[in-house]
Structure formats: structure tokens, C-alpha cells
Amino acid sequence: MKYPKRSQYKHAKSRYRVRNWTEYEAGLRKRGDLTVWFSNTALDAWRAPASGRPGGQRRYADIAIEAALTIRMVFHLPLRQTEGFLRSLAQLLDVDLPIPDHTTLSRRLKELGDTQFRRLATDQPIHLLIDSTGLRIHVGPMQKPPRNRAWRKLHLAVDADTGEIVASNLTARRTHDCTQVPALLQQIAEPVASVSADGAYDTRVVYQAAHEQGEGRPVRVLIPPGRNAQFSPKPSTALQERDRNIRSIRELGRREWHTHSGYSKRSLVENTMYRYKTIIGRSMRSRTFDGQQAEVQLACGILNTMTRLGMPDSYRVA
């Protein structure tokens, strides 16, 4: 067998085999189960409680809007089809449940605000994987998308052990990736053991934010510095991790450092980005920034639910 050259490694497609195929296949079937998305909790809290104030009262609680918009995003339905889907579902279940119309769904989406997506609770320190990607936005009444189409930048922080999204943020396209790390870390209440990101995050802001997140505990920062990176002229506690990475890369080599330090696990966050774009989509449907932020929060909750249903445990065979 003739092995590829080192420069051809990125063009050679690797083969993988799944160890837990039976469990993973069962999880894939559960993703299409309607009971996963339309729970008894949503039915009980569907109607909004009376506020006691004069004027028109809300008929639907936030959980009702979230449930309807979640179904819309999972099955890729327009708003009117979502309304019809829910009406037929309520009829099949034989429940007296008011269904929000499509205009209510569109209006309430912008008012949802910060939706806390559920994730598994843990008392163990989290190994964070951080990355960003671009999402296209709605072009409005234009018949043809412009050449320089506007887009948003999605920033995600993923738990390396569970594969769940633990923090997210949506910004303008010209926002630098490194500036969003403090905002992502502020969303995490659990202790952080390490932070891994690509070379775009090799800035003082990231190391300082990781050091502050530790609150006295050491936080390992795995960010590959540039090829000609030098040690910090004024060493500080926050930049000790950067100097440590430079020293290790010079001793082991960059490729060996990826495996030895555990930086190679960062590919899991890239896999999460791929899952987001293939399951949810590469474009956002809302035309307002508030609606787009709520849309991203709902999408992260959907991906976390699918992750808990089952993920493949694969290994490389060739």
C-alpha cells in the first residue's frame, strides 16, 4: 500500500466505525418522536396566567411559544404550516388547547429574550471548546440575494465530555472572536478546567478571562500560538499558559503537541457547528436581531436534546 505524502493528509478521507450503533440508532429514531417535543409540562403551562392589570391579557405563556417555535425549527416549517401542524396535533390528542396563530408566533419570537437552553447538570469541572461560524440572514423582499450578503457570527462553547452547548452568543459579522470569550464564560456557573480554541483566540483578553473564571483555581488554556510566537516580555499569571504552550510546542513539535496536550479534542466543537448547519440550517429566518438571538437559543436547546438522546461513539479504522 502506498501511503499519502504529508502534504496530502488533508485530502485523504479517513474511515470511522461506530461502537454503539444500536444505542445511536435508537436515539436517531427518538429524534422524530413527537412526544419528545410536545411534553405534558408544555400542555399544563400553555395558557398565560392573568396579570391583574387592565387591558388585553396574553393568552399563551412563553413555554407555549417556545414549544411551537421549537417544532417549527425541528421540522423546518413556515409559520402558517406550524400553526396548522399544532392545530392538527391538538385535534389528534383530543385536547382543548388554544393554538397561537402565525402572527403571534412572529411577534412573540422577538420578545422571548434570553431563553435558557437545558443541559445536563454536573459538579465536575468543564473542559470548554470554543469556536465561531457564520449564519446567513434574511434578505427581505429582494428576489436575488446580494453578492455581499449580510450574515451574523455565532459563537459557541461546548462541553468536551458531553458534547452539549453550554454557552452561545450572536454578534455582527465583523466582531472579533476573541472579544466574545468573556461573555461566553459569564454564562457558565460550573467550574472550568480548561479552555481550547484555535489560533484566532491567541490574545491577552482570552487568557485573562480564563484566569478570572478559575477564581483562584488553575485553568488550562490550549490555544496554539503563531509560528514565530515569543515568550511574554512581562510574565503574568494569566499569560503563563501561553508561555507553557510555546515551550511545549518547541520541545514536542506542533503536531505532537496537539495530541499530547488534548488540543485535538477541539474538533468536537467544529462537529457541533456542522450539526447546527445540517440540522437547523445555514440561514436564520427572523429579520430582527432580537428574533435571531432567540432563534439561536432555541436551536442550541434542540441540539442539546438530540445530544442527550444519543451520540455515536466512533473510532478511526483507516
Image (cartoon, rainbow, N blue to C red):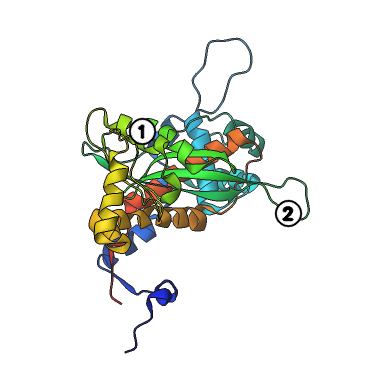
Residue placed furthest toward the bottom: 1
**In-front residue for pair 207/305:** 207
> Marks 1 and 2: CB-CB under 8 Å?
no
Residue type at tag 1: Gln
| Mark drawn on residue 145 | 2
Separation (CA) of disc 1 from disc 2: 41 Å
Local SS, label 1:
helix
* Residue drawn at x 53%, y 39% as measured from the top left: 170
| Residue 66: image location, x then y, percent | 50, 37
Q: Nearer the viewer, mark 1 or mark 2?
A: 1
| Residue 139: image location, x then y, percent | 71, 47
Mark toward the start of the polypeptide (1 vs 2): 2
Residue position for label 1: 208
Q: Is residue 124 visible?
A: yes
The quarter of the image holding the C terminus is: bottom left
Local SS, label 2:
loop
Compared across the picture, whether 57 is left or right of 270 comes to: right
* Residue drawn at x 53%, y 48% as measured from the top left: 73
Compared across the picture, whether 62 is left or right of 81 comes to: left
Quadrant of the image occupied by residue 100:
top right
Residue type at tag 2: Pro
**In-front residue for pair 95/214:** 214
* Residue drawn at x 63%, y 17% as measured from the top left: 56
The tally of labels here is: 2
